[in-house]
Amino acid sequence: MSQRIQFRQHGGPEVLELVDVPAGEPAAGEVRVRNHAVGLNFIDTYFRSGLYVPPSLPSGLGSEGAGVVEAVGEGVRGLQPGDRVAYATGPLGAYAEHHTLPARHLVRLPDSISFEQAAAVMLKGLTTQYLLRQIHPLQAGDTVLFHAAAGGVGSIACQWAKALDVKLIGVVGSAAKAERARALGAWATIDRSGEDVVQRVLELTDGRKCPVVYDSVGKDTWEISLDCVAPRGLLVSFGNASGAVAGVNLGVLAQKGSLFVTRPTLAGYADTPERLQVMADELFAMIDSGKVHVEIGQRYPLREAAQAQRKLAGRETTGSTILLP
């Protein structure tokens, strides 16, 4: 038997329950992983609340973890029991002692990266990789705008951008978060609680605005982000912490300077095992080099997943949060 967190109905953190379930044997093409650490991410709260709908109820939760292969199904090549692995995509169910998932979602974890580091960084780090390294060919000296720069993805983006000699302007919600973003490598910060974001971007860029704006906030910052993009520039809308962007008028893109917009996902970029491993290898190399530091601010036992989500939703966390089965 194995323990997992599941929910039978949508709602607040109180709907999460710890249950005993069979560990299960992997089917063809699948691998069973014994989790050593599990990542906690804001998207998990979307599935729990019903903003995103799981395939069925009751449902497991979570998509990020790291551990050791326990069993492999028929046809699996390149993985065997005892291998160290990590994952950030695939079916829900990472909040568990064991997680069985298709082998294509797993990456090999080098000995230099701990299970806790991997669980804390895989989703956020791979997201940062495709944002900064694939969506747009950033060049040294480019100035970009990044919302929620002190958050999970933003914290890694600040470090990675600095390593690329990219000037990242981080939008944050408080003076303390501004200080944190600068310490992580942001070139400049804008405190949206007391500053006009668009005006400050104009000042910081000598009126040129930014060739790329990264926005994970969504509804509340959509118009602001559009006004910060330089002509023929790109707005990357990769999250909706404040709610989904709706009613988009494509004519506005023309009016504001022939702008481009994309709504990417990690699954859309890590869409083959080969591409996923290349992305992960680059992330692990950044960590090994010391250019990206993984900060684990909170550790909770698996049974306290509800409390961990309350802290996350209440913005009472720093760095990454992990669950320990």
Image (cartoon, rainbow, N blue to C red):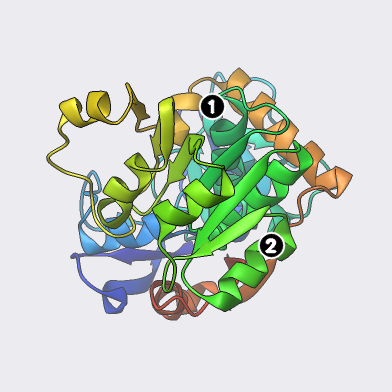
Q: Position of residue 290 (x, y in %)?
A: 85, 50
Q: Is residue 162 above or below residue 40?
A: above
Mark 1 vs mark 2: in front: 2
Q: Residues within 10 Å of mark 1 (few under 14, many from 20)?
A: some
Q: Position of residue 15 (x, y in %)?
A: 26, 74
Q: Quadrant of residue 299?
A: bottom right
In this rendering, position of residue 21 left or right of residue 96: left
Residue at image coords 29%, 56%: 47
Task: Please state which amino acid type lies under the numbered disc 1.
Answer: Arg
Residue nearer the viewer, 150 or 55: 150
Residue at image coords 52%, 27%: 270
Q: Is residue 125 above or below residue 130?
A: below
Residue nearer the viewer, 156 or 266: 156
Q: Which residue is mark 2?
A: 182
Distance CA(mark 1)–CA(mark 2):
37 Å
Residue at image coords 35%, 33%: 263
Residue nearer the viewer, 19 or 282: 282
Residue at image coords 62%, 47%: 168
Task: Please state which amino acid type lies under the numbered disc 2.
Answer: Arg
Q: Position of residue 14 (x, y in %)?
A: 29, 79
- The number of numbered discs placed on residues in the rendered structure image is 2
Residue nearer the viewer, 264 or 21: 264
In this rendering, position of residue 129 left or right of residue 64: right
Q: Residues within 10 Å of mark 2 (few under 14, many from 20)?
A: many
Under tag 1, what secondary structure?
helix
Q: Residue furthest left?
A: 247
Q: What is the quadrant of the C terminus in the image?
A: bottom right
Under tag 2, what secondary structure?
helix
Q: Which residue is mark 1?
A: 104
Q: Position of residue 4 (x, y in %)?
A: 44, 64
Q: Is residue 50 above or below residue 125?
A: below
Q: Quadrant of residue 72?
A: top right
